[in-house]
Amino acid sequence: MVVECVEAYARLMSLGEEKTISVTTFRRSGDGVATPTWVVPLSGGRIGFWTSSKSGKAKRLRNNPRVTVVPCNNRGKVTDGTSPVAGTAQLVSSGAEFDEIRSKVKAKYGVMVPISKFFNTLGHIGKGSFPYGDTGVIISVDA
């Protein structure tokens, strides 16, 4: 059990170095919904990303913090030879942890951040307010 926990922790940390991971969140029915997501390594052996507080991902996480994560490409195709790591997510919208996520995402993805925000804004024209990156998600590996 201890060896499995250490291996899962090591895999989670290596996931933080990936460009994109597939994060599976779970509906109330138990059905998983996988979403390709940018990711950054965080202090304390965790990984993080940001999302909109109005996204389906954030809504599902408010109901159930259980997630699985696995490396993938930008379109969500899981990297061959990899298997999911189970974790628990925590939502944050302010404070040091949110600031850490925000600064690391901007540092890692650079010019892609404003480009992504622009296309997010375009995609939601006429649909009402849809904040960009206002919620941080911190994932810890399950022990």
Image (cartoon, helix red, strand yellow):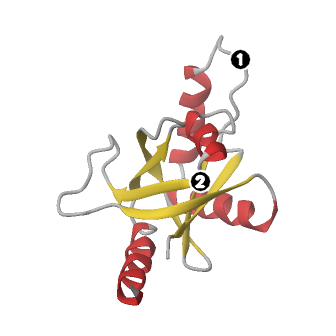
Q: For the N terminus, give its image quadrant.
A: bottom left
The reply, left or right, for residue 62 in relation to residue 12 is right
The reply, left or right, for residue 77 in relation to residue 57 is left
The reply, left or right, for residue 99 in relation to residue 46 is right
The reply, left or right, for residue 105 in relation to residue 91 is left
Q: Which mark is residue 128?
A: 1
From the viewer's perspective, is the residue at label 2 or at label 1 nearer? 2
Q: Which mark is residue 65?
A: 2
Residue 70 position in % (x across, y down) = 35, 58
In the rendered image, the vertical position of residue 16 relative to residue 55, given as above or below: below
Q: Residue lying furthest right in this view?
A: 95
Judge by depth and name the residue closer to the eye, 2 or 84.
Answer: 2
Residue ID at (56%, 46%) = 113
Residue 42 position in % (x across, y down) = 59, 72
Q: Residue lying furthest top in this view?
A: 126
Residue 13 position in % (x across, y down) = 45, 75
Mark closer to the chain start, 2 or 1? 2
Callout 1 amino acid: Gly
Callout 2 amino acid: Pro
In the rendered image, the vertical position of residue 70 relative to residue 25, given as above or below: below
Residue ID at (49%, 46%) = 25
Q: Secondary structure at mark 1?
A: loop
Q: Secondary structure at mark 2?
A: loop
In the rendered image, the vertical position of residue 135 relative to residue 139, given as above or below: above
Judge by depth and name the residue closer to the eye, 24 or 52.
Answer: 24
